[in-house]
Amino acid sequence: MRKTFSMAPPRRKLRFVLGILVFSRLLLHHGWSASKDPCTWINVNCDKPTGNVVSINLDSQSISGKFPSELTQLASFRSLSVQKNSLSRPLPSFANMSSLEELYLDSNEFSSIPPDFLLGLPNLQIFSISDNGELSPWQISSYLAESTNLGSFFASNASITVVIPNFFDSFPNLQNLRLSYNNLTRSLPRSFGSSEIQNLWLNNQQLGLSGTIDVLSSMTQLSKVWLHANAFTGPIHDLSKCVNLFDLQLRDNQLTGVVPVSITGLPKLVNITLQNNNLQGPMLEFGNNVKKNLGNSFCNDKPGPCDQHVTTLLVAAGGLGYPITLAQSWEGNNACNNWSYTCFPTFCELFSWLQLISWEECEYRWWITGFRSELNARVEDIRR
């Protein structure tokens, strides 16, 4: 009597999938044969007690064609790696694959993502779909907040649009968030401040993220921050509690104001870029171990304090949130050298003018209201 080979349903589905894919290189070179138990195939791992397939690793195997939706029927599946291939066409939904922990789809040629793509994945820990530039625009859906075990979310150059969701306090284990080279807009979500994110990559958005970056001061576990090539505005806030921060990339934005001196005291900082903003005040001095590019409109081209008149005006500008119109015209260390609203030979004459001017005709008519006492104290200091 001829002996037949029996296979559990999950294995039978996997055999069918591999048959329709015609992965010729795998079949020829890796011994993926329908006559063998799939648990013996190279790059396929099974759970020994049950015999169910739990992971497949096809990283960099020169695979092309459509991604097989049948793979999503493997209920015990924990890890799938198909990165660095040439897989194309629409991705299937991985919805309700409750055992799935790792999903690596990066560096392929997928064309679209279904609405319920990552719905109902409570055990998902690592998701990577970076470098899929052919994808149709898509958004990060609110249901992702249900994946509370998420530790890494990598989706740079993946055609993500609209806004960054405000749910990052839902992930107690999330350490890595990479969303660079997409088309995200608007401001940073406030939930960042209650998150556990350590490495944050949001650089090079097509239209640029905007708003302030003050939430960074609450992200005390940060190690790496890449926010460059966006449209962020306002000042850099105190980051002294971010004691693990070693890489801070803020160049090519619209940041204004005085750089807090506390940044120079960050114990692990080794790399910082600030150029191509509208930062003012004194240039800071960093240790020799710090690689830096600081180019801005600092009052001097070397570290050291600014002129006392310049310092006073910047204090007042700070009360307005350092408007970019002032930051773009208030350059150098001489407030009477083509600084808008300050064309006076002495600071005391400027102060008198600020008290007498008809503010109804001035863009900053309400500026002096909250700073009269501050300016008066500064004038008295100068007179002494």
Image (tube, rainbow, N blue to C red):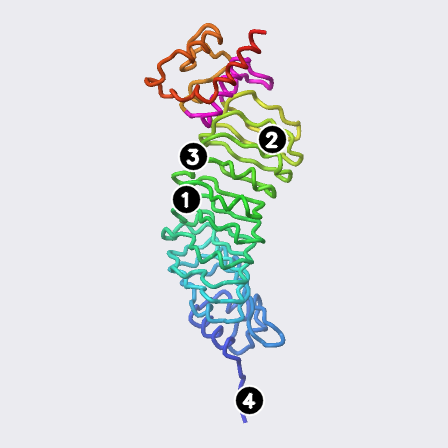
Find residue 3 and name its label.
4
Q: Residues under labels 3 and 1: Cα distance?
A: 11 Å
Say which label, 1 or 2, has the lower sequence index: 1
Say which label, 4 or 2, has the lower sequence index: 4
Q: Mark 2 points at which residue?
A: 263
Question: Circle 3 — which element?
Answer: loop
Q: Residues under labels 1 and 2: Cα distance?
A: 28 Å
Q: Mark 3 points at which residue?
A: 231
Residue in view at x 50 percent, y 32 percent: 251
Range shown magenta: 297-324
Which is in the foreground here, disc 1 or disc 4? 1
Pinpoint residue 318: horizontal percent, then vertical percent. 49, 24
Say which label, 4 or 3, has the lower sequence index: 4
Labelled pair 3, 2 in contact (Cβ < 8 Å):
no
285 sits left or right of 113 in the view: right
Q: Check disc 1 and give the amino acid type.
A: Leu
